[in-house]
Image: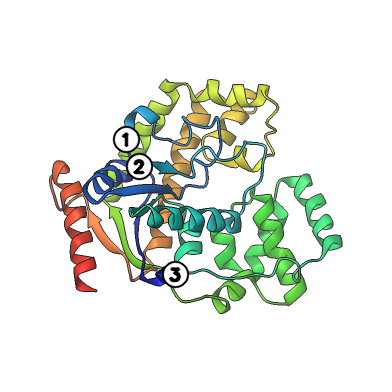
Amino acid sequence: MKDSSDQPLVILAGPTASGKSEVSLALAKRFGGEIVSADSMQIYRGMDIGTAKLPLAQRQGVPHHLLDIIEPTESFSVADYAALANQTIADIHRRGNLPIVVGGTGLYINALINPYNLNKQAIRDPAYRQILKSQFDIDQGVTLHRQLQAIDPQAAQRIHPHDGQRLIRALEVYRVTNQTISQLQQHNEQPPAYRLVFLALTMDRPRLYQRIDARVEEMMAAGLAAEVQSLLRQGVSPQCQSMQGIGYRQMVSWLQGETSYEQAVEWIKRDTRRYAKRQYTWFKRDSRIIWLSREDYPEEEIPKQAAAMLLNAFEEE
């Protein structure tokens, strides 16, 4: 059996609304690939419109993995993702196909190509964790996020104040080890597990923001409000990890009478644009990325250029 470091892995990343789905389908059909999602919201069942999940009918027969794998009431960690994704990638290799990891969740991608180990059993303080949970319940993470910002700005940038699980974990790690979770992750990095080609899509910021605004309008027309209302009726709490996603928390605010419909939609657009900016910041740090700008080629040429870049990258190794 080949060592996993000899096995090819393609990553296709980029900010939300940059057109990853279209390009990934073209690559999968061209190279005999299967797509592995790296999207922290598309893992949830019943959360389709607000996550821009590609409908089954539009997947063109290409296998997609790690979509709809847990209920919206369940929690899911980066470690959970890495374990499932690595197993899925190994299965794809055994079938003789090419795994193509597609998404914009930088932490998920990072867990695959820069794996680290944090001993969950050794780094624990249950009593302190309970204190943090109580504080989180008071103000939905505002105070805890401020604390994290003071000790670990890098982690605070990638962890949303409403993401209680990761926020509490980062503070617990610092309490037990006197080191930030960012420091520990860096120190525990391991050699790359795969023969990697890392592509990412980009475009001019104003054009991307126009695409984001248009996508949000499409989501609203497709019934995002009804999707969120249905989730609430099924017993999914607004405090669940899944409901902290962009689009869902804003719709909850409207449904609970905390804001107007128009304001909620504007907040979705604004927060999505901010998220795209953070995605750019995250990915620009990785020198391995081969960037493909949509400004450099006609729209119909983008998938062909991505395929050419992929071929060149593997041939150069």
Image position, residue 268 (x, y; %):
48, 36
Which label's residue is closer to the chain start, 3 or 2?
A: 2
Circle 2 residue: 17
* Residue 256 can be seen in this image: no
Residue ID at (66%, 46%): 75
Quadrant in the picture for the C terminus: bottom left
Looking at the picture, which amino acid does disc 3 mark?
Ala
Q: Quadrant of residue 180?
A: bottom right
Residue 2 appears in the figure = yes
Query: As drawn, which residue projects farthest toward the right?
Result: 127
Residue marked by disc 1: 61
Task: Specify whether 56 is left or right of 114.
Answer: left
The residue that disc 3 covers is 193
Q: Secondary structure at mark 1?
A: loop
Residue visible at 13% across and 45% down? 298
Q: Quadrant of residue 137?
A: top right
In-front residue for pair 256/222: 222
Q: Amino acid at mark 2?
A: Ala
Farthest residue, direction front: 1
Gap in angstroms between the C-alphas marked 2 and 1: 22 Å
Q: What's the distance in space between the residues labelled 3 and 1, CA to CA? A: 28 Å
